[in-house]
Image (cartoon, rainbow, N blue to C red):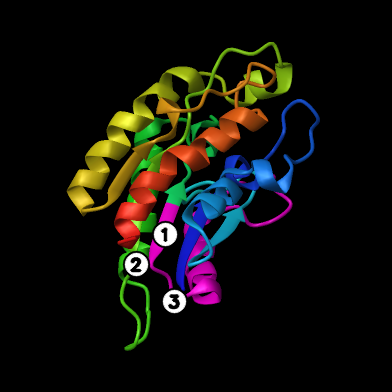
Amino acid sequence: MKTVLCYGDSLTWGTDAATGGRHAFEDRWPSVLQAALGSSVNVVAEGLGGRTTAYDDGLADCDRNGARLLPTVLHSHGPLELVIVMLGTNDLKPIIHGTAIGARAGVKKLVSLVRFHDWGRECETPEILIVAPPRLCETANPLTGASFRGGIEQSEMLASLYRDLADEMGCGFFDAGSVARTTPVDGVHLDAENTRAIGRGLEPIARMMLGL
């Protein structure tokens, strides 16, 4: 059986902006991807709300630094055939970093952590798929609007920056914004249909990278 790790934030966890809770299991994009790939693949959903690529959040109630946590997660779920990374949205908060170029640097760090991880002599280094998260949108929500001040313009740069990074580092690339749109309820998260759309959109490239 091949194992795929989906490493992300609240978009991977499945936050529902309309309710403040979590989308149904079958609506989350890793679950949709699992159903599409079938029983010969194990898709592991490793989503954490507020997770950054490689930056500390001093106000968080747990460690949300993706680079610090990734090596442990790789050990927990390895061996792996594919690591899908969809992070960077939270990096755009001014209190975290505030720029798309900072998110790109963080994703580059994550790719390096996967490549140079101690996989053991019997394990091959997995393929890596970099996913640009959907762009932020306008919202009347005062909390997220303030938290992501200036983030819409920065989020529009992510796909181009991540595509170039994927080419540079020999990774796969997918623009989640090509199939999904954030909801104006909070300008950040996805409704159920757009969450499912990411799973459907990822299937062809994941299948190709897994050699299925």
Instruction: State the residue position of label 3.
Output: 79
Q: Are marks 2 and 1 in contact (CB under 8 Å)?
A: yes
Q: Residue 37 in the image: x percent, y percent? A: 47, 55
Left or right of 176? Residue 147 is: right
Residue 190 horizontal/vertical position (percent): 62, 29
Tag 2: amino acid: Pro
Residue 183, placed above or below residue 64: above
User: CA separation, marks 2 and 1?
Assistant: 7 Å
Residue under numbered circle 1: 83
Distance from disc 3 to disc 2, alpha carbons, whole Å, reads 8 Å
Please provide the residue range marked out in magenta.
Answer: 56-84
Against 113, residue 162 (above or below) is above
| 201 horizontally vs 18: left or right | left
Q: Which mark is residue 126?
A: 2
For numbered disc 2, what is the local secondary structure? loop
Tell me the amino acid under the disc marked 3.
Answer: Pro
Give yes or no for residue 28 being in the magenta stretch: no
Looking at the image, can residue 189 be seen?
no
Instruction: Please tell me in which quadrant of the rendered image residue 137 appears.
Output: top right
Residue contact between numbered discs 3 and 1, judged by CB atoms under 8 Å? no
Q: Position of residue 146 (x, y in %)?
A: 64, 20
Task: Identify the residue at horizontal 46%, vertical 51% (top origin).
Answer: 54
Q: CA distance from mark 3 to mark 1?
A: 11 Å
Q: In terms of secondary structure, where does tag 1 sit?
A: strand
Do residues under tags 3 and 2 come within 8 Å of each other at their CB atoms? yes
